[in-house]
Image (spheres, rainbow, N blue to C red):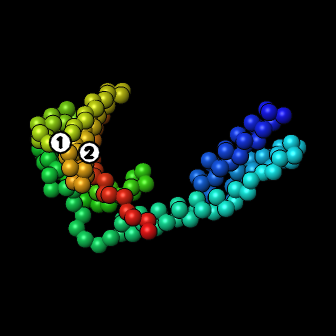
Amino acid sequence: MKSNFVSVTLLLSAALSFAPVTRAQEANPDVAKMLKDAEEQAKKMNMKVPDVKPQLAEMEQDQAKEKAALKKQLEAPGPIALPAWTPKLPQFTAAGPATRKIIDDQVHIIVTGTSPLTPAELGDAWEAAKTEGMSFGRSNNSINDTKTVIITLRPQDAAQGEVRLEATRAPKEKITHVTITSPLPKPNMD
């Protein structure tokens, strides 16, 4: 009896955890099957299955609000630029103007481009530009001889945001591909 209860609980929690991801793809047969299996197990044990439909509907509403707020922030008029305190990169050629893009459920300002300098040289330039009032993180990676340097700078005043440099160069390339991003504050969903 106890193992059946655990099974029903696990099935319900799995169905609830997968539901938000899959609801966007219309009625997902896998989620529907999990919910049906959980209901059948509960009936066998003479248990009442909680109605999860209101919870799913509320989660869908919250996701829709968040998506609408992000879209509004993404399409907002006005200048698009990295924070004024962003360090300059030597010998950097931008591929175009700064743009906005949604990354990991947050709108970011993004500038991409190239530089003839190595990722390490670009990272050193940013590291030298940091001031005493900044937190700093650096990651130097090499995977299959592709060199990548990732640096994040963040002023102690959190209201000023952060900037992140990612510089990557493949083994036989003569240029480094650079992406600089800065997340915008999360929008208010109300």
Q: Nearer the viewer, mark 2 or mark 1?
A: 1
Closer-to-camera residue (128/10): 10
Q: Residue at x 14, y 52 (%)?
A: 85
Q: Report x, y in % for residue 79.
A: 22, 67
Query: Dot 2 lies on which element?
Result: strand
Q: In this view, does 151 lie above or below 70?
A: above
Mark 2 is on which residue type? Arg
Q: Mark 2 points at which residue?
A: 164
Pointer 1: what residue? 134
| 26 over 119 or under it: above or below | below
Nearer the observer, 176 or 53: 53
Query: The residue under label 1 is which amino acid type?
Result: Met
Q: Is residue 60 visible?
A: yes
Q: Earlier in the sequence, mark 2 or mark 1?
A: 1
Q: Residues within 10 Å of mark 2 (few under 14, many from 20)?
A: many
On-image quarter of the N terminus = top right
Location of residue 112 with respect to 1 vertically, above or below: below
The C terminus - image quarter: bottom left
Q: Is mark 1 on a helix, strand or loop?
A: strand
Residue at image x 70%, y 40%? 10
Asked which quadrant contains residue 137, the reply is: top left
Image point (52%, 65%), residue name: 64
